[in-house]
Amino acid sequence: MAEDTRAGVLDEHRRITNVLQRIEQWVVDPKTGAGWTGELGGMLEELQGLLKEHFGGEAEAKLFEQTIASAPHLTAQLTKLAKEHSQILAAFRAAFEQAQTLDAAKEQEVRGLQRKVQLALATLRRHESEENEIIMRAYWEDMGGGD
């Protein structure tokens, strides 16, 4: 059973990473034209669905609660990260909505959306990195490897 869970988590992370990479490549050199914003909107919509599932899965699995129970000194950091889930989803939703209504012929608007998406991506990457570090630290301490 644990192997199934692990495989599911790895598959989820692969799918998220794949979409993140596609979005990052897409916004590096934005093109004018409805095709660019339409494609970006589709990828952002896909990412939102994956993130809702990912963040919801963390809550369902009670990962944060379990980590807090074994490492109460990490409570403030984990609480902050849990609150960020809705902010991250809102940032990607705002970018998606902007992509839907953007005049892709206006280079300045395209560049603004490009920056918005890049900021949301950077926030998500930082968030996931902090989460992983905290959970690994708690695991390490629980296994007796910490000070």
Image (cartoon, rainbow, N blue to C red):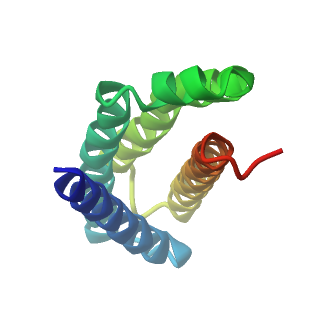
x, y percentage for residue 54? Answer: 33, 42
Q: Residue at x 27, y 48 (%)?
A: 50
Q: Position of residue 99 (x, y in %)?
A: 36, 50
Residue 44 or residue 79, whichever sits in front: 79
Residue that extends furthest to the right in the rendered view of this protein: 147
Left or right, residue 78 beside residue 41: right
On screen, residue 99 versus residue 122, left or right, reads left
Q: Is residue 5 left or right of residue 69?
A: left
Is 73 above or below relative to 141? above
One can see residue 38 in this view = no
Q: Nearer the viewer, residue 108 or 29?
A: 29
Question: Measured from the top left, where is residue 25 in percent x and y?
Answer: 46, 77
Quarter of the image with the C terminus in it: top right
Disc tally is 0
Give percent across and percent down for residue 18. Answer: 34, 71
103 in relation to 25, above or below: above
Q: Residue at x 67, y 21 (%)?
A: 72
Residue, x 58% and y 61% (percent of image)? 111
In this view of the protein, which residue sits in the foreground, 100 or 81? 81
Closest to the observer, 56 or 89: 56
Q: Above or below — where is 102 with respect to 53?
A: below
Is 74 left or right of 1, judged from the image as shown? right
Snapshot quadrant of residue 34: bottom left
